[in-house]
């Protein structure tokens, strides 16, 4: 009888071929400062990129996936996000974007709503924002605290953030807390 520990997984290689334009960010690999390769291929070995170049020069692999002329760019690394919050500052954002003065509560509005929100609400919000970021090409997401303004609320924010990313940063106070 064979058990799961008796079998060794064989790494699988996959070639993603016929990428119309591949941005490598390495000028030695392609044209210009972005290292652009036309009709490109990327070979993935397990969880690593093993090779990039023109499709016509791609090495043999276990699998081939045709990108059908789609472009490929590196993922976005978001190194500054505050996703653990509640409240809505849409009116204030719209006013600022249209050059109008705004008199909404600013960060204090978000602080009050965040403090009042349950962990479940905050966790659901973060989960929704993370999925949206991933769908838009973010590959690494750092989440900062900052909308609690008390030790307890900041610790709560960090705990919620840590459930969604390994990249978590304490950012204690955007403003002086209203109680001070």
Image: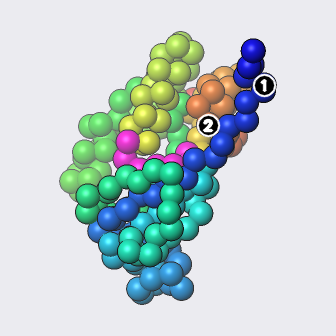
- Residue 165's tag is 2
Asked if the magenta segment contains residue 138, the reply would be yes
Q: List x then y, in percent, for residue 139.
A: 51, 49
Residue 154 appears left or right of 115 = right
User: Label 1: how many residues lie within 10 Å, few (<14), some (14-19) or many (20+)?
Assistant: few
Q: Is residue 113 above or below residue 103?
A: above
Q: Residue at x 46, y 58 (%)?
A: 15
For marks 1 and 2, the one nearer the N-term is 1
Write down the region rendered in magenta.
135-141
> Which quadrant is home to the N terminus?
top right
Task: Give the residue at mark 1.
Answer: 5
Q: Nearer the viewer, residue 73 or 118?
A: 73
Residue 109 appears left or right of 154 = left
Q: Is residue 34 above or below residue 126?
A: below
Report the mark closest to the observer, 1 or 2: 1
Q: Residue at x 78, y 26 (%)?
A: 6
Secondary structure of the residue carrying numbered label 1: loop
Q: Is residue 16 above or below residue 40?
A: above
């Amino acid at each position: 009888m064979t058990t799961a520990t008796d079998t060794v997984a064989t790494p699988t290689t996959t070639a993603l071929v016929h990428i119309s334009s591949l941005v490598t960010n390495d000028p030695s690999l392609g044209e210009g400062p972005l290292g652009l390769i036309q009709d490109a291929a990327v070979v993935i070995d397990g969880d690593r990129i093993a090779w990039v170049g023109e499709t016509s020069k791609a090495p043999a692999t276990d699998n081939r996936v045709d990108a059908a002329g789609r472009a490929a760019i590196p993922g976005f690394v978001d190194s500054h996000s505050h996703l653990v919050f509640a409240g809505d500052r849409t009116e204030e954002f719209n006013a600022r974007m249209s050059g109008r003065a705004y008199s909404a509560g600013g960060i204090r509005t978000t602080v009050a709503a965040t403090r009042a929100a349950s962990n479940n609400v905050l966790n659901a919000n973060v989960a929704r924002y993370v999925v949206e970021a991933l769908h838009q090409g973010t590959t690494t997401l750092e989440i900062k605290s900052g909308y609690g303004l008390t030790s307890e609320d900041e610790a709560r924010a960090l705990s919620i953030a840590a459930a969604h990313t390994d990249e978590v940063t304490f950012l204690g106070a955007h403003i002086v807390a209203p109680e001070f």
